[in-house]
Amino acid sequence: MARRSRKASRRHPLATVVLIAIGLVVTGGGYAAFSSTTTATADTEITSQAVIDEGEKLFAANCATCHGMSLEGTDDGPALIGVGAASVNFQVGTGRMPMAMQGPQAMQKPTQFTDEQTLALAAYVASISPGPAIPDESLLQADGDAANGGELFRINCAMCHNVAGAGGALTEGKYAPELTGVLATHIYEAMLTGPQNMPVFNDDNLTPEDKRDIITYLKYIENNPSPGGYELGALGPVAEGLFAWIFGLGAIIGLMVWLTAKSN
Amino acid sequence: MTSTIDRTGSGDSTPAGAAAATDNGPAKPKSGGFTAAASNYLEDRTSISGVVKEFGRKIFPDHWSFMLGEVALYSFVVIILSGTFLTFFFQASMVETHYDGAFVPMKGVEMSAAMESALHISFDVRGGLLVRQIHHWAALLFIAAIGLHMLRVFFTGAFRKPRELNWVIGFLLFVLAMAEGFTGYSLPDDLLSGNGLRIIDGLIKGIPVIGTWTSFLLFGGEFPGTAIVGRLYTLHILLLPAILVAFLALHLVFVIVHKHTQYAGAGRTNNNVVGYPILPVYAAKAGGFFFLVFGVIALMASFFTINPIWNYGPYDPSPVSAGTQPDWYIGFADGALRLIPPGWEFVWLDHTWSINIIVPVIALVGLLAAVAAYPFIEGWVTGDKREHHILDRPRNAPTRTAIGAAGVTFYAGLWAAASSDLMATHFQLSIEGVIHTIQAWVVLGPFLAFFVTKRVCIALMKKDREIVLHGFESGRIVRLPGGEYIEVHEQVDDYERWRLVDYEVYEPIMLRPNAKGQITPGMRFRSRVSRWFFEDRIAPAQQQELESGHGHHGTHGDGTDHSLEEGPGLTKP
């Protein structure tokens, strides 16, 4: 539905003008949002009925097939009663929902909805029954205690996500994804709601401050390049061994062949 | 040789009398300049010229694959240099302390003094991180170079008499290098190394009856205890290097004593060595090569992170990171553990028996033992007591090459299994699928590799034989006056032909009664193994075949040239 109408509007004579206008607004607005860190999520607190209605329409058109018209779930998807805005924002905001197909795990992919649409969906789902809310911006600034966050991360997260957040394998084709490049909001929401195979780390388990510290640690290692040089994916000894064999020994064998080559 | 260099060296400064300077002139250093004077001073007091003369004239054949051992040697020198630097700063102690160095995400974290000093080396000692990374990269290269060197020696048959013992020494060096690597990997007491030690602890505890006691003995109590880092440090910097250096020296002495092997070629026999003398050519090449190897290692260490202990954090028995692997050379052991199917433990006499751990351990020890024993096995099969200094081309020893390929396939399967989780995530596979595939690979792969390799070797030998007898296709099509088209075959030149025909073919042992007139089961077994080894073979082209074979196609005396057959018909005309 949404796709067909988008296609038709693309042929409109003013489409180019609109497109340029949208591009300018998005880049300018995005720049303003990122540079001044004005809290866009403040709007989410004010969930007007209009936003909820918008969310309901989007839900009916895009989600209800699997999750049911009243969030009750079907054979193809779980009930969404009580999952809260945080869960919706994570699943839709990272592109995991709507799923392209059933599989071991919903894959991260380019998002299908704009931020406003995502927030509208979240508002709608949260309006049906209460659940974890989208976290407060003050917890997402990556300004906590990185050392405490690192320790908590190693104890609670590293067994699936790898100490450097490079991701890891789970059973039956499932996996813990890489954590670099994930927005602080989404990291927080993932801990809070336990998407896919991830356990829930509720506020009794990891306090909001602990979650903030973990985000601080992840952002620290993401923003500070490895002191030792290129990280080879932070995958540990396998990547190092592969590199030593192929590039290290490869280079040396190249030199050996050169040294023993007969001059013509 | 050496004196020639002295002579020309001094010749620049004193052109007049230079050419007349005497070799090792005893009493009167004439106008020889400083070099000659110094040489004479040394010579008068040490008589070293004999040694220099002897060594300077040692001949080494030139081939790139002969330098793999050198790479191992040079990486080892780099390891010793960088390791010595690290000992100045490393604290081999498991005393609890709190980190207070430059790395922010570790500030105030409780850790052992070993981990604290490793972080101190990485962030606060000038050049410390570079040296740490040089040490670690050099270690990876060291063992990789040993591995390739062993493969080269194996596939070219360089382990045959008189070098069997040197093969065993080299094998011990390989095992010692792995032990050195593992003890070093465990020293920083970070999360990764602690997990590795926990696996070793599990391997030891999996040994029936004595396992638990052995583990307590090693760790000084329950794992991890407070003793292990200090003990591993003693092994890592004292005991293992001392043994390693001793065996390394012995290995090199044997290389000098046996002289180097060489590939077949015109003028090369079992009684000579064709190549360049150490002085001046090889000394320069090898000396330069040391700096090239050091340079490659330094570049790797400068630009690529290795073992980022600041990510892993201090060891704590509770967390285990995803992607926890040993360094590559222990990967085959880790992989073997991963490949064992579940449910192999059972309870007997009120004790749990972990067959799932002892089986892979036995398999690994068996693999290593087979590697160490191979020269003696092949020597027993061939019954060949002659010395061999001419190397085989791998294709000319099809069964050996096929056994080697099977071994490599087996090892590769175990090795790959150690990265099963990374293969699963990076190729979007299920980890069970990866493990099951590798399980099948490890069991079936060696047989497949053996068969394919042997057939390929024999096919290549056939091709070589055909090229020697008929020449190679030149691609030039000629039309004869009668209208017939032929492709002109060109003969290979004499040097190439030498390379292609200079090899020996063994025949299966004839089962004959011994002096007592008996055929023992042992003899029967040996004869059967010998037949399995040598029943498929292609003899090199002989002189009379060459003479009669030039330019003729398909008309060879007995018509058996291109066929593979049992029996002596082909092998020795």
Image (cartoon, coloured by chain):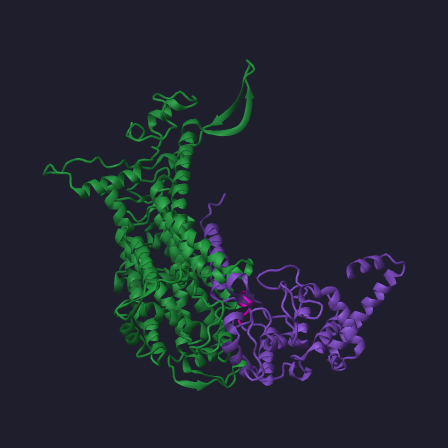
Chain colours: A purple, B green
Q: Position of residue A75 (x, y in %)?
A: 62, 63
Counting the numbered discs, the total is 0
Instruction: State left or right for residue B115 relative to residue A84.
Output: left
The image shows residue A50 at horizontal and vertical percentages of 81, 76
Residue lying furthest right in this view? A13
- With B23 as the anchor, is B138 left or right in this view? right
From this view, report whether residue A206 is shown above or below residue B545: below
Residue at image location 87% in from the left, 63% down from the top: A17
Q: Quadrant of the C terminus of chain B?
A: top left
Stretch in magenta: A228-234
Q: Is residue B13 visible?
A: no
Quarter of the image for residue B352 reads: bottom left
Who's the residue at 34% across and 35% down the image?
B537
Is residue A224 inside the magenta stretch? no
Name of the residue lying farthest toward the top? B482
Query: x%, y% of residue B62?
Result: 40, 48
Residue A150 at x, y percent in the picture: 53, 79
Can the viewer see residue A192 in this picture? yes
Nearer to me, A241 or B195: B195
